[in-house]
Amino acid sequence: MNGEVNLIRGRLKTPRAAAIAGILFSILMITGLTVFRLSVPANPLETGGWLKTRSNSVAFALNLVPFAGIAFLWFLGVIRDRLGAHEDRFFATVFIGSGFLFIALLFASAAIAGGILLAYQARPAGLLDSTTFTFARAATYEIMNLYAMKMAGVFMITTSTLVIRTGFCPRWIALLGYALALLLILSGRYIDWISLVFPLWVLLISVTILIDNLRRPSAEGNQPAHETPKD
């Protein structure tokens, strides 16, 4: 009896854990991207003037990235747990693979940007005129805006497909995910602030899951209890 109660409690907590992890990832990611975009020009070939006036803001944004990545990994795990036996192996592989690649590329981009900050602190006079800065700045831009955003788009497509196949979220969120994913894949490099689409969509899914999870116990509590048969 105690085992069954613990299992039920675990199943009720799993969607809530997914929602909290997704909301935490979205808040950290949106905050970091916003601060970074406001501090660093979108042009990957700019001369680096932001290093003189915006280094602290960029460092703050980069420090949020590891925590956002941890929250996203937790989000992946609890979503898979919620799918359970309904999980499709093919889509689950692409789902997990695209999520891992997104995190890896996000960390790589942040690490290069952090390296630029450290190099500027060591040699502020010589860095900006070097080809090393030009390469590092361009690499940061390409990894984040081209490769990471495309992996985010693939993640949105596979997650939307899982939503349609399993119904763990409303269907309209999946249709919106398809549209935004195509926009992200085709326009990641050419539209400023397009990178915010991904965390905003994760936030939408997370809030929907949380609301559904909060409503479910009350709905179950309103059901009449079954009478225990007498011997």
Image: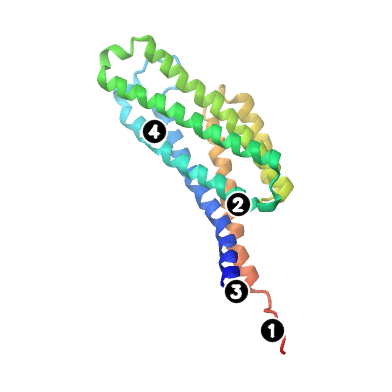
Way the structure is coloured:
rainbow
For label 2, the SS is helix
Can you identify the residue that label 2 sits on?
81
Q: Circle 4 is placed at which residue position?
A: 62
Q: CA distance from mark 2 to mark 4?
A: 30 Å
Label 1: which residue? 228
Tell me which corner region of the image, top left, top right, bottom left or bottom right, holds residue 217.
Answer: bottom right
Q: Earlier in the sequence, mark 1 or mark 3?
A: 3
Q: CA distance from mark 4 to mark 1?
A: 58 Å
Could you classify mark 3 by the number of other residues whose Cα lies within 10 Å: few (under 14), some (14-19), or many (20 or more)? few
Instruction: Give the residue drawn at x 44%, y 14%.
Output: 45
Label ID, residue 1: 3
Secondary element type, mark 1: loop
Foreground label between 2 and 4: 2
Q: Alpha-carbon distance for marks 4 and 3? A: 48 Å
- Do the numbered discs 2 and 4 sit on residues whose CB atoms are within 8 Å? no
Nearer-the-camera pick, 96 or 200: 96
Determine the residue positioned at 38% across, 9% down.
131
